[in-house]
Image (cartoon, rainbow, N blue to C red):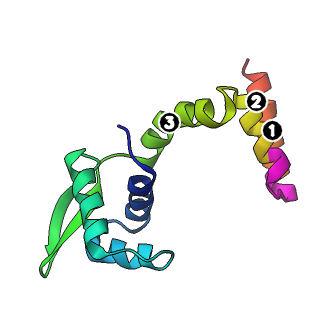
Amino acid sequence: MKLSEFELDVMQLLWQHEPCTAVTVHQLLSEKRNLAYTTVKTIIDRLEKKSAIERCGQQGRSIVYRTCVAQKTLSEQAAPNFIQRFFRGNSRHLIAHFIEEEELNEADIEYLQTLLKNKKTNK
């Protein structure tokens, strides 16, 4: 399933706040950017057509939606394209970028070291 950046933003909100109405999604998105309700509703309609979300009830006159796709599933589908697009298909460059650019605390570093150690042990 291929989703636009805006569709992914809406999916993120639905995963965090589901079940959720289009009005609620609009309110949450409007905290960060100026959007018309009709724009948000169009994206929700597209997501419904793509079977990423479905109607699961009603609150007054508002339709309530829930996701049909797990966040992990979309992440797994999007990761290879993301790595190809921004890091020429080389995951090493992606990992190096995050290690070099992100502020990592001691717990983050320990976690990453554990992941690497486990990866090395399982090979």
Q: CA–CA distance between discs 1 and 2?
A: 6 Å
Q: Quadrant of residue 86?
A: top right
- Foreground residue among 49 and 69: 49
Give residue 76's mark. Answer: 3
- In this picture, residue 117 sits left or right of residue 63: right
Q: Is residue 121 above or below residue 104?
A: above
State the residue in front, 26 or 55.
Answer: 26
Question: Pointer 1: residues within 10 angstroms few (<14), some, or many (20+)?
Answer: few
- Residue at screen point 39% across, 61% down: 10
Q: Amino acid at mark 3?
A: Glu
Q: Which residue is mark 1?
A: 96
Residue 62 makes an appearance in the image: yes
Magenta-colored span = 99-108
Q: Which residue is mark 2?
A: 92
Task: State whether the magenta stretch is mostly helix, strand or loop.
Answer: helix
Instruction: Residue at 83% x, 40% y: name it.
Output: 113
Q: Say which element carries label 2.
A: helix
